[in-house]
Each structure stands twice: as structure tokens, then as C-alpha cells.
Image (cartoon, rainbow, N blue to C red):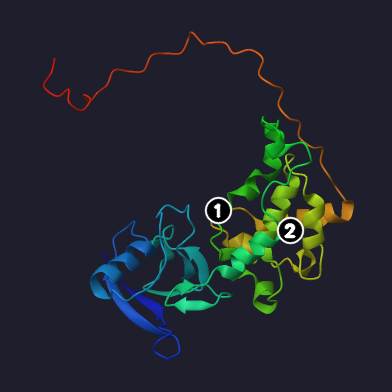
Amino acid sequence: MPFITFNIQRYNPDSGRMPGKQEFKLNVAPGQTILDCLNYIKETLDASLAFRSSCRMGICGSCAMMINGFPRLACQTQVLSLGKDVITIEPLPNYPLIKDLVVDLTPLFDRHRRVKPYLITSPGKGTDAPREYLQTAQEQEQYLQFAYCLKCGICLAACPTVATDDEFLGPQALTQAYRYNTDTRDAGRGERIKIVDSSHGVWRCHMAGACAEACPKGVDPALALQLLKRDILRGRTHPQAAIAPPVTEVRKRSNIPRPPARTVKASGQAGKK
């Protein structure tokens, strides 16, 4: 197993010192991730190391950080796949720094809230209706890719416009604006267009494409922003989804297979025949 040097940025706001680097050298086995190594360092070498993590499966987005100058999820990044003997780990840029690798994600969620990332229903529909909306698989495909966002904050860290404009809504929020505008169950397009059709909204995007390159889930925010620009210029709308008709008849299915026999006896049944 090769020795890998981890050059990790450290910062304690209580110390009064500027951020600096600290080295740790570890034997790394094939398959080990950056998060595995950070957990090992915290558990055995330096308990003061601060970083975020949760699911370990690329679902929560908590462990986003800069790894060798590129924003990645630590739980999805295998150490040996980087092909480097020295790995530099830093917090995400474009966010206020809290401690070590932990940043304040408040700007991400503030931008997200501003675009109203939820279904806005027409009068007489939605919460006023006791039944579900009807939506075809083809209609769902129009927005499904953009619904996979983890809110990890990587796209804002990669975006050069976010780095120079504190008021820019950013690729995450604008992608979600397009996602809900395209949903046939939604009737809030007019409200969101007023927010995103502005100098610090979608038109501030310079199409660097860094957000699409960095996104760990392939959401492709750059594509969503281009589609959002097109829809604003065309004034495109979609027909409102219909409400499912009431259920008038319920039939009991007779062909449902029986479950397989249990392989483990229920509690209290051990030893009984």
C-alpha cells in the first residue's frame, strides 16, 4: 500500500491566525476514499480536524470540498484514482469559512429559497384538490435530470461569476427555477421569471460551464440555464396538468402471489416446531 501525503487546510477562528496547511501521511489501500482517510485522521491522529460528512454514499452532499484544486465529494473520490502522491484538501471557495474544511452554506440556501423551489398550484388545484395530478413519463423527463440536485454547493464553488458577484443567484438556484417552471404540475412560472429575469439572475451567467463539469450527479446546471434563457425569450409555457378523476370502483386482485416462507423464525418461536 503506497504512502500518500495529505496536505489539509486548517483554520481555527479562535486562534487569530490565518488558514494554514498541515500534513498527514497515510498508507492507503485500493478503494479507500478521501472521506475514509479524513475519518482515520480524525479518529487516530488529530481529533480537532473539522469537516462535514453524513451518508458516505454520494447522496447527502455534505462532504463537498476542494481536492487537488477541484471541487468533489470526498465520499465518492477514491484516493488512488487521483494518481498523486500528495493530495491537497481545502474548503469550498465562494463561501464564508467556519473552521478547517467546514464552510457556511447559508448563501446557497438563501439563493435556493429566492426562486421558490416548490410547486405553486393554480386556484382550485393542488392542496385544494383531494387527488393527484396526471403527468406523463415524457413530461417528467423534461425536468427529471435537474431534480437530482444534492444541494452540495459544488456548482457555486466552481462558478467564476459567483466569485465576482455576491448578488448572482448562481447555477443551483437557477437550475431549480427551470426545474419547477418545466413541471406541468406547477403554475408559478410568472412569479419565478420576475426573480430570475434580471441582471443578477440568469443573464449574469457567462456560460463558463464549470458548474456542469464539477456537478457530482451530472445535473448539468449549464444546460438548465441555457434552456431557462430560451424559455424567457420565447415566453414558453406548458399546459397545466389535469387532476386525476375520482376512483369510482375498487377491485380486489386475486392473482397476487403469496410471500415466500420465512427463513428466520419470528421472535419467541425459536425451538418450537
Q: Which residue is mark 2?
A: 225
The percent position of residue 152, horizontal first and vertical second, equals 53, 61
Task: Quadrant for residue 221, please give it.
Answer: bottom right
Q: Residue at x 39, y 89 (%)?
A: 15
Helix, strand or loop under label 2: helix
- Farthest residue to the top: give it: 254
Report if residue 223 is visible in the image.
no
Residue 24: horizontal and vertical position, in percent? 30, 77
- What label does residue 217 carry, if any? 1
The residue that appears at 32% across and 65% down in the rendered structure is 39
Q: Quadrant of residue 116?
A: bottom right
Q: Earlier in the sequence, mark 2 or mark 1?
A: 1
Q: Amino acid at mark 1?
A: Lys
What residue do we see at 20% from left, 28% from top? 267
> Badge 1: few (under 14), some or many (20 or more) residues near its Cα, within 10 Å?
some
Indicate left or right for 257 with 222 as reference.
Answer: left
Q: Describe residue 228's horizontal placement relative to residue 249 as left or right.
A: right
Residue 157 image point, x, y percent: 58, 70
Q: Residue extending furthest bottom?
A: 16
Q: Is residue 207 left or right of residue 107?
A: right
Measured along the vertical axis of the image, is residue 152 above or below residue 126? below
Occupied quadrant, residue 14: bottom left
Visible residue check, residue 208: yes
Estimate the x, y position of residue 193 in percent, counting from the top left.
Answer: 80, 57
* 235 left or right, relative to 123: right
Q: Nearer the viewer, residue 67 or 38?
A: 38
- Amino acid found under the numbered disc labelled 2: Leu
Tell me how far mark 2 sits from mark 1, CA to CA: 17 Å
Q: Secondary structure at mark 1?
A: loop
Badge 2: residue crowd in 10 Å (few <14, some 14–19, many ≥20)? many
- 108 relative to 238, above or below: below
